[in-house]
Amino acid sequence: MRALAAELRGEIDGICIEYHYFKNENVIEKAKEIIPTIQKFCTGFLQGNSYGISEEEYQNLQVFVIDVLKDYVAAIEQEDVVWIIDTLDYGLRELIELYIDCLLYTSPSPRDTERS
């Protein structure tokens, strides 16, 4: 999932940079192309609480993931470029950051895995 998060972050960066810096509003096709990657990444959040958080926090996370997916689908269906960019920038990017933060807390440090 780590590689998938990096791939998705790169795709989101590319789309958002084209929109924000190059004023290219023709990002809808690119946004549609990353749907399978988004689905695969978000599925990881919905397959069980392996993030070391309470059940209540995990349920809130699931609701957030589903809301982000619903927003993205609606934005794509309506071909609303601003909504697509907002969902990528503030919804999916936040999920990627949450995932990375969880890795920091749940993965052992290299020092912890060294053998004497």
Image (cartoon, rainbow, N blue to C red):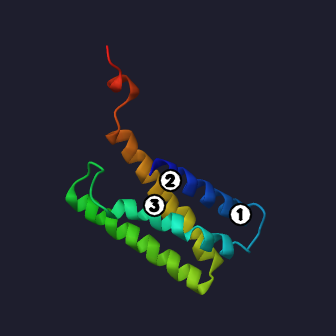
Q: Residue at x 74, y 74 (%)?
A: 26
- Residue 65 locus on image (x, y percent): 39, 67
- Residue 19 locus on image (x, y percent): 71, 66
Q: Residue at x 39, y 43 (%)?
A: 103
Instruction: Determine the CA span between mark 1 and mark 2.
Output: 22 Å
| The one of 22 and 30 positioned closer to us in this rendering | 30
Q: Can you tell which quarter of the image residue 28 is in?
A: bottom right
Q: The disc labelled 1 sits on which kind of residue?
A: His
Q: Residue at x 70, y 59 (%)?
A: 17
Label 3 or label 1, whichever comes before in sequence order = 1
Q: Nearer the viewer, mark 1 or mark 2?
A: 2
Label 2 or label 3, whichever comes before in sequence order = 2
Q: Can you tell which quarter of the image residue 116 is in?
A: top left
Residue sitting farthest toward the bottom: 78
Judging by the rendered image, the residue that carries numbered circle 1 is: 20
Q: Residue at x 39, y 40 (%)?
A: 104
Looking at the picture, does residue 1 appear above or below residue 84?
Answer: above
- Residue 53 locus on image (x, y percent): 26, 52
Q: The disc labelled 3 sits on which kind of residue?
A: Phe
Label 1 or label 2, whichever comes before in sequence order = 2
Looking at the picture, does residue 103 appear above or below residue 28?
Answer: above
Q: Is residue 68 left or right of residue 79?
A: left
- Residue 30 locus on image (x, y percent): 66, 70
Looking at the picture, does residue 96 appear above or below residue 68?
Answer: above
Judging by the rendered image, the residue that carries numbered circle 2 is: 5
Q: The disc labelled 2 sits on which kind of residue?
A: Ala
Judging by the rendered image, the residue that carries numbered circle 3 is: 41
